[in-house]
Amino acid sequence: MRLAFILFYLFLSPYLFGQVDSLRIICQKQLIPFVDGQDLLWMYRQRDTLKSVSPTGPIELVVNEKLIGLTDSLSLRYSASLSGEYPALDSIWYSVLAGEIHAFEMQKDSLHKRVDQLGWKMRYLQSARDLKRQQQLNRSGRSQVLLSFHNFGLAADVGLYSRRKYLKRSTRYSRLGQEAKSLGMFWGGDFVGFPDPGHVQRFANSAAFIEKYPFISFEFERYRDAYQRAYWKKQSVGREDLVKDTEALLISMNRQRIGGVCACQYATLPTVQIPINSNAKVEVNTQQNWVYIQPKGSNGYYYSLGRWEYEAKN
Ligand SMILES: [Zn+2]
């Protein structure tokens, strides 16, 4: 009898208690009686990514037929991030990340001094990087990350030189890494799958970054599809070990989204023709429980309102 009980718990408890998959979230349709401006911006980001060709421009936000304005500084930053094709993330987020960027600058100075003491010649190569440049590097295969700490001014690339010649490969980079780590930085030579021995950064990985600054996950959200594809691709061939950072990032991003308002699947075509040159727009009707999302210069779609939930593990 007792054995039957144990077996029952062993095999059935996952179903009874609903194990969730922390890597998969789904927009679950439900009545949403109240939304704020930030909810609307998140839904816009959810449905529109850098895939769209043209910059978004200003976004019109409407709740129950009333135009709403953004007042809090976070919403204004989200809005700035959505409004440009390649927004300069370092300038949008500089004031909130200033302490972090400043601390990183001090680490960089200390690292430079230590390398000088070794009698080696070093130089910081271009460190800040905009999104357009990041995309170019990504397409050419020179970078595998979609959103880099360089985009926030929280990473730097070091060039070591010998007799005025740039050292592309050298054991000196391992020593550089040791020094960087002893100063609390994280070294690209430790990256799994795509080691980058000249690279140093402020955080261990993107997951650690958004755990400390949850609002910054708004920037990572634009690449959600790509992160998921990259993760499932490696997982399907049994190489999750190569995408540990991506896995950690997705888990953190999902944790931030759970319970948040979302635009659920099964879009329908707009019932009225909206002029193609109008602004980007997000409109919510809480009585009828729908959201209408229209990128600039293209057709909009209606979605049911809901909240993010974890999918059940299968
Ligand atoms: Zn780098």
Image (spheres, grey):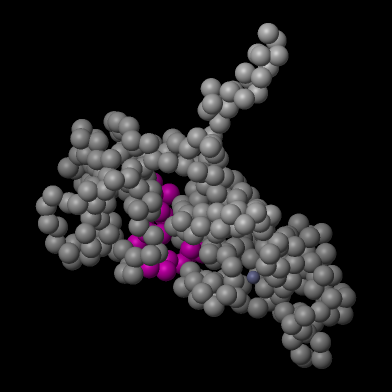
Based on the displayed image, in which of its 4 quarters is residue 127 positioned?
bottom right
Residue drawn at x 80%, y 73% as measured from the top left: 173
Position of residue 50 relative to residue 9, above or below, is: below
Is 73 magenta? The answer is yes
- Please tell me in which quadrant of the rendered image residue 203 appears: bottom right
Task: Classify residue 63 as left or right of residue 76.
Answer: left
Residue 86 in the image: state x and y as whole percent: 42, 69
Q: Residue at x 46, y 67 (%)?
A: 88
Q: Is residue 134 visible?
A: yes
The rendered magenta stretch, by its main secondary structure, is classed as helix
Which part of the image, by quadrant, shows the N terminus?
A: top right
Residue 107 appears in the rendering: no
What's drawn in magenta, residue-wise?
72-91
Magenta segment: does it hold 237?
Answer: no
Residue 283, position in %: x, y?
Answer: 23, 47
- The answer to whether 150 appears left or right of 80 in the picture is right
x and y, in percent, of residue 44 in the image: 34, 52
Residues 91 and 25: in front is 25
